[in-house]
Image: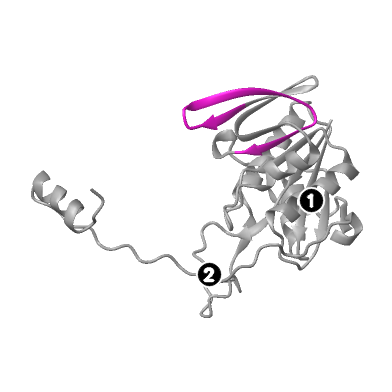
Amino acid sequence: MKALVAVKRVVDYNVKVRVKADGSDVDIGNVKMSMNPFDEIAVEEAVRLKEAGKISEIVAVSLGEKKCEDTLRTALAMGADRAVHVETDAVLEPLTVAKLLKAVAEKEQPQLLLLGKQAIDDDANQTAQMLAALLNAPQATFASKVVLAGDEVVVQREIDGGIEEVALKLPAVISTDLRLNEPRFVKLPNIMAAKKKPLEKLTPADLGVDTALRIEVVKYAEPKARQAGVKVADVAELVAKLKNEAKVI
């Protein structure tokens, strides 16, 4: 069984990003970049399934500029067998990402497609759902437990009311949530070994996908600073402030 895992290069979660002075974009010059944390969980889950004998091959795929190779090498060091890099300098919208992943999936024919539930840079939470729709494949989002059994996968997914369990026929698309696992620490020997693992290069043109933007970004802006809180003497004063100042009641 083959698993395809999508990984994205994003600003490291410890970095506080700033909007450019002209509001045209977010300034990511000279900041630390790393694998999207939710995608890291997806890679870890694929590796655990392989270690359990449920998966025979893990293919990591990333879309974007040449520096995405570093992210793919991290996935290879974690335990992926080989990587596919769709290299492009174009800005990729979620639908375009889904179309590119669909094309890679049709080429690789995986039985399991694992993605992080969202990327921490745009927080779109759209790609996995769009990919499942394009492939006409069953999907399970926000997975907190994944169990492969024969030709189906049982997924426990987090919902507002608690945990929902669904069974999907393979091939299927799964997006991973935080509580699914804790990614392993990558050791130096594995990092060195990852440099020798195969990494295939493709372009959107090779896959027949148009990367033209369909959404126009007008402006980026930082959220307004939160005002300091105030203490009230009693409930009557609280109600008065909510009614007369905040005007929420």
> Which residue matches tag 1?
99
Q: Earlier in the sequence, mark 1 or mark 2?
A: 1
Residue 168 highlighted magenta (yes or no): yes
Q: Does residue 240 appear in this view?
A: yes
Quarter of the rendering containing residue 235: top left
* Magenta portion: prevailing SS class: strand
Nearest the eye: 134 or 171:
134
User: What residue type is disc 1 on?
Assistant: Lys
Q: Position of 239 compared to 176: left or right?
A: left
In the rendering, at what x and y percent does residue 16 appear?
49, 64
Vertical order, 69 against 31 (above or below): above
Q: Type of residue at label 2?
A: Tyr
Q: Of 165 and 199, which appears nearest the observer?
A: 165
Residue shown at 60%/52% (left/top)? 124
Residue occupying the point 26% across, 51% down:
248
Stretch of the chain drawn in magenta: 156-176
Kindly tell me whether residue 82 is visible in this rendering.
no
> Which residue position holds label 2?
220
User: Where is the N terminus found, in terms of image quarters?
Assistant: top right
Residue 123 image offset from top left, x and y in percent: 57, 53
Which SS class for mark 2?
loop
The local secondary structure at tag 1 comes to helix
Quarter of the rendering containing residue 86: bottom right
Residue 165 on the magenta segment: yes
In the rendered view, how is the structure colored?
one colour
Depicted 109 relative to depicted 33: above or below = above
Horizontal placement of 178 versus 78: left or right? Answer: left
Query: Mark 2 Cα within 10 Å, few/some/many (few <14, many 20+)?
Result: some
Do callouts 1 and 2 mark residues in contact (Cβ within 8 Å)? Answer: no
